Image: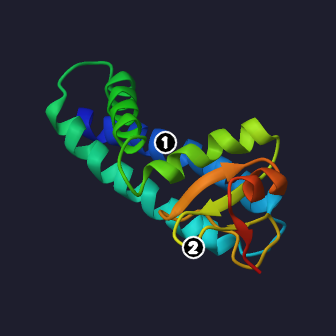
Amino acid sequence: MRSFQRASAWLAAYVMGLPALGLVALILALRGRSWWYVAVPYLGLFMLAYLIGLILLALLHFRPDWLRALVAAVVVYAIASVTPLIDTMTHYPYHVVRCGGLPVIGDGFGMSYNVPGDEYYSVTPFAHRFYCKEKEAEAAGYHHFV
């Protein structure tokens, strides 16, 4: 039982602790504007990843505990990156790096986009595309949601 407890602590660090540091950086980048629209879905995603990871930990039986937790975390994130309605949220950090800052978010529901600083700027399961510039979003047929 102690091994599972140690492995679950490592898993919490991998799927909640490390990504939470990135979330804090994202909140700071938003400079206090509508941070809850971004943070709340991600916190829910972290909790879901941890719970699924616990199931995987129960199925995996090898040592060391940190490696077992790492394998479970990688599997959880691999599954999340191809799961509909979650894959958008898992790809968002990649676009932050690619664009060198917060990207323009295109909503596939209404073909509108939001830019960082907009009141409703957030990553949701309905966020369809990410663009580095507004002109790219407009060229793709999106209009600015004000």
2 and 1 marks in contact (CB < 8 Å): no
The kind of secondary structure element at disc 1 is helix
Q: From the viewer's perspective, tell me whether residue 43 is left or right of residue 50.
A: right
Q: Position of residue 40 (x, y in %)?
A: 54, 69
Can residue 1 be seen at all in this image of the molecule? no
Gap between marks 2 and 1 measured at Cα: 37 Å
In the image, residue 136 sits, relative to residue 108, either above or below, namely: above
Tell me the residue at 52%/53% (across/down).
89
Q: Position of residue 78 (x, y in %)?
A: 38, 34
Tell me the residue at 80%/60% (across/down).
28
Q: Residue at label 2?
A: 110
Q: Quadrant of residue 3?
A: top left
Q: Position of residue 56 (x, y in %)?
A: 22, 38
Q: Earlier in the sequence, mark 2 or mark 1?
A: 1
Q: Quadrant of residue 135?
A: bottom right
| Amino acid found under the numbered disc labelled 2 | Gly
Q: Residue at label 1?
A: 13
Q: In this rendering, which labeled residue sits more in front, label 2 or label 1? A: 2
| Amino acid found under the numbered disc labelled 1 | Ala
The kind of secondary structure element at disc 2 is loop
Q: From the viewer's perspective, tell me whether residue 69 is left or right of residue 46.
A: left
In the image, residue 110 sits, relative to residue 135, either above or below, namely: below
Viewer-proximal residue among 53 and 3: 53
Tell me the residue at 78%/41% (across/down).
99
Q: From the viewer's perspective, tell me whether residue 5 is left or right of residue 18.
A: left
Can residue 70 be seen at all in this image of the molecule? yes
